[in-house]
């Protein structure tokens, strides 16, 4: 059983008010990971290599693959994480979960812990500056915090995720650029960047779309890789 301790967290005194056995954690199933990606926009955005607002089933499977490529499991203290997992006590946790109409049942999680059934690991994003943000598993992490325990989480390296995203976007942009070279619109976009014209003059909306999207994706690639935007786009357009 864990010892009861009090911790000051911002305006709350977070008391380890739950006396629980050590929480066991299991790596989330593909279904559980997909549910987290579906429900957390920031997580989906980090893994999304397209510009589509309506990802397909195949897109989500690619997101899942990407998550596994850029993450590892780590043991963390939940009080050191940013996120919505901080409650004054267990009653406050239950009240908050119910008020948002979330499909979570904290009581069933407590029963699982008492019976030795592992809980799915929360999902955390680690930024380049070392800051950790909780994106999935706030209820589980809150219970761990209130019982004075650490969590074992799936930690996504944001920089690795951004570089992976940049590679996917560049591939997509290259494909679009090849299409545009057959239409002449791509050359017009190249001229626009090299000559700094006010606007590229496209002969039709159809030709404009691919060239604009390719240019937009190249700009995003430069941002993700920390490259000078103009020099990068001009290089890709040559």
Image: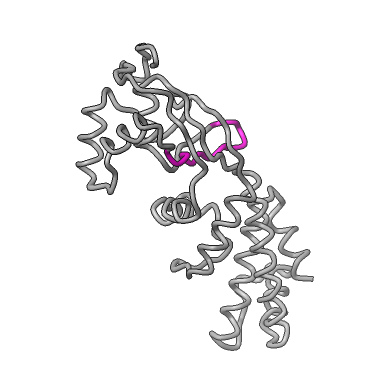
Percent from the top left, x then y, of residue 133? 48, 36
- Indicate how the structure is coloured in the image: one colour
Location of the N terminus (image quadrant)? top left
- Provide residue 227's location: percent of width, then percent of height: 71, 51
**Image: magenta residue range:** 119-131
Query: Is 118 located above or below residue 173 in the figure?
Result: above
The quadrant of the image that shows the C terminus is bottom right
Q: What residue is at 54 percent from the left and 85 percent from the top?
A: 205
Q: Outermost residue, front direction?
A: 115
Say whether residue 111 is left or right of residue 145.
left
Q: Nearer the viewer, residue 185 or 39?
A: 39
Viewer-nearest residue: 230 or 170 = 170
Q: Which residue is drawn at 48% across and 69% down?
A: 57
Is 129 one of the magenta-colored residues?
yes
Vertical position of residue 154 compared to residue 29: above or below = above
Q: Position of residue 77 (x, y in %)?
A: 49, 24
Q: Residue at x 30, y 19 (%)?
A: 12
Q: Which picture quadrant has residue 206?
A: bottom right
Q: Is residue 1 above or below residue 212?
A: above
Give coordinates of residue 176: x percent, y percent.
66, 76
Please say whether residue 120 is one of the residues in the magenta stretch: yes
106 and 174: which one is in front? 106
| Total number of numbered discs in the rendering | 0
Q: In this view, does 57 lie to the left or right of 5?
A: right
């Amino acid at each position: 059983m864990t010892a009861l301790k009090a911790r000051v967290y911002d305006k709350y005194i977070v008391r380890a008010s739950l006396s629980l056995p050590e929480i066991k954690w299991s790596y989330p199933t593909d279904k559980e990971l997909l549910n987290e990606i579906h429900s957390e926009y920031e997580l989906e955005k980090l893994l999304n290599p397209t510009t589509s607002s309506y990802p397909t089933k195949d897109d989500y499977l690619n997101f899942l693959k990407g998550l596994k490529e850029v993450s590892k499991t780590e043991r963390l203290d939940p009080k050191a994480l940013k996120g919505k997992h901080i409650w004054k006590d267990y009653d406050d946790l239950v009240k908050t979960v119910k008020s948002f109409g979330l499909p979570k049942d904290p009581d069933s999680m407590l029963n699982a812990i008492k019976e030795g059934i592992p809980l799915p690991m929360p999902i955390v994003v680690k930024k380049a500056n070392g800051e950790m943000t909780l994106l999935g598993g706030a209820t589980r992490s809150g219970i761990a915090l209130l019982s004075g325990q650490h969590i074992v989480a799936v930690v996504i390296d944001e920089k690795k995720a951004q570089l992976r995203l940049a590679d996917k976007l560049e591939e997509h942009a290259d494909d679009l650029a090849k299409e545009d070279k057959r239409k002449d619109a791509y050359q017009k976009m190249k001229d626009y960047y090299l000559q700094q014209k006010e606007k590229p003059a496209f002969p039709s909306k159809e030709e404009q779309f691919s060239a604009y999207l390719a240019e937009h994706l190249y700009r995003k690639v430069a941002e993700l890789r920390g490259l000078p935007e103009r020099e990068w786009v001009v290089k890709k357009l040559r």
